[in-house]
Amino acid sequence: MDESTPSSHRKKRHLSRRGVIGAAGAVAAGAALTPVVFAAGESDDATTTDAGTKPETFPATRSAAATGTGTATTAFAASYVAVRWKGTTDGAGIRFGDGAWQPLTAGCATVEDGGTALVAADAARSYEVKAPDGATAVHSLAIDTTDGPDRTFKVPSGPTRMRGVRYLSRPAWGADESLRHKDGQVDSPEQYYPLQTITVHHTATPNADPDPAATVRGIYEFHAVTNDWGDIGYHFLIDEAGVIYEGRYSGDDGLPAFDPDGNLVTAFHTAGYNSGNLGIALLGTPADQGPTDAAKASLTRLIKVIARFKGLDPQAKVTFVNPVNGVTKDVPVVSGHRDWLETDCPGQTMYDLLAEVRAAAAPR
């Protein structure tokens, strides 16, 4: 990673829960959280309300770690397998059961010292990893986000909005906050800097996802544990139905992505250029096919309200200056991941639509 690289993260099984697509806002297990709810439309006036809570049950996320290459088996049907190694990125592969080998590619996630991948496992109970020649520190994590034992959470009955845009808070999609901690301390402490740019990504997970909130939980486990980032890498994620998910933890004030002073929490989505750069990821792979109309509409509106909130012009170009190390990069204010690094992200079709998104998000 870059200036925000956390220290080594232990591999454990952690609790999580099923996402609720129709619900928004939530509380951590057993503890009340009063969400910040913004006035309807795109008002700059914030009001705090107590919407009340109700108990709901969700499955715990189960995970099983393995090291090295060879075959690994699990006691549960895996939703995803995450893999991380040091060394060249070419030549890594995975196969499930007696199936065919498939290459391991980073998709959106990038690390500076090797390769990483998250692969849909289709309920497999065994898999085999093949590492590139000379690779070291190979480890994998089988993840089940759908069939673990139930756990009860207190979920607010009212919606949570950011400047008129409804979103699911971290507890509402099942973010297990223990993933952010190690040895009783936050593994990747929050740092805040003024917002300069917005970067669009895709998650490189399957399209037509039947349970996108479960996929968000899988990505969280992948980023926080396997990639050792201590949290999910994006500030927001958007599924094909247009549902927006809060990503990187930014404090308990109820305002996603920002602190009370309006500074952006550093996340882990664009290696070397994270601080001051807000990341939004579309769930799925918008490469040969474009995003759904609902996803594109939510992306456009989210960019519009954030740009208005921070006084950015979505159609402008800027020289990004990393506030940690001074590294600069000339990029659009609203960029694609590939504008920063060599990657396919956010998919060719989505990348080609960014000009349309910028124009639609610009002030009129």
Image (cartoon, helix red, strand yellow):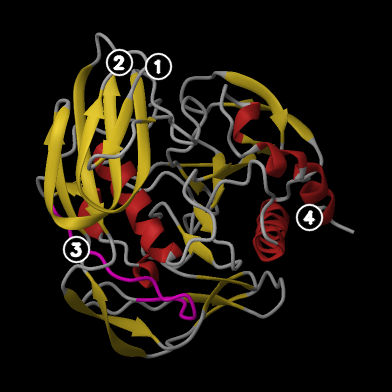
Mark 2, mark 3: which one is toward the viewer? 2
C-alpha gap between disc 3 and disc 1: 34 Å
- Indicate the amino acid at tag 1: Asp
The stretch of residues the image draws in magenta is 13-26
Quick one: 52 or 137, which is closer to the camera? 137
Q: Is residue 67 visible?
A: yes
Residue behind mark 3: 15
- Indicate the amino acid at tag 3: Leu
- Indicate the amino acid at tag 4: Ala
Label 2 vs 3, first from the N-terminus: 3
Looking at the picture, how far across and down is residue 123, in whole percent?
A: 27, 56
Q: Are circles 1 and 2 on residues that touch, CB within 8 Å?
A: yes
Mark 3, mark 4: which one is toward the viewer? 3
Q: Is residue 18 left or right of residue 182?
A: right
Taking the spot 79% from the left edge, 47% from the top edge, the residue there is: 358
Quick one: 102 or 33, which is closer to the camera? 102
Residue behind mark 1: 90
Residue behind mark 2: 132
Mark 4, mark 2: which one is toward the viewer? 2
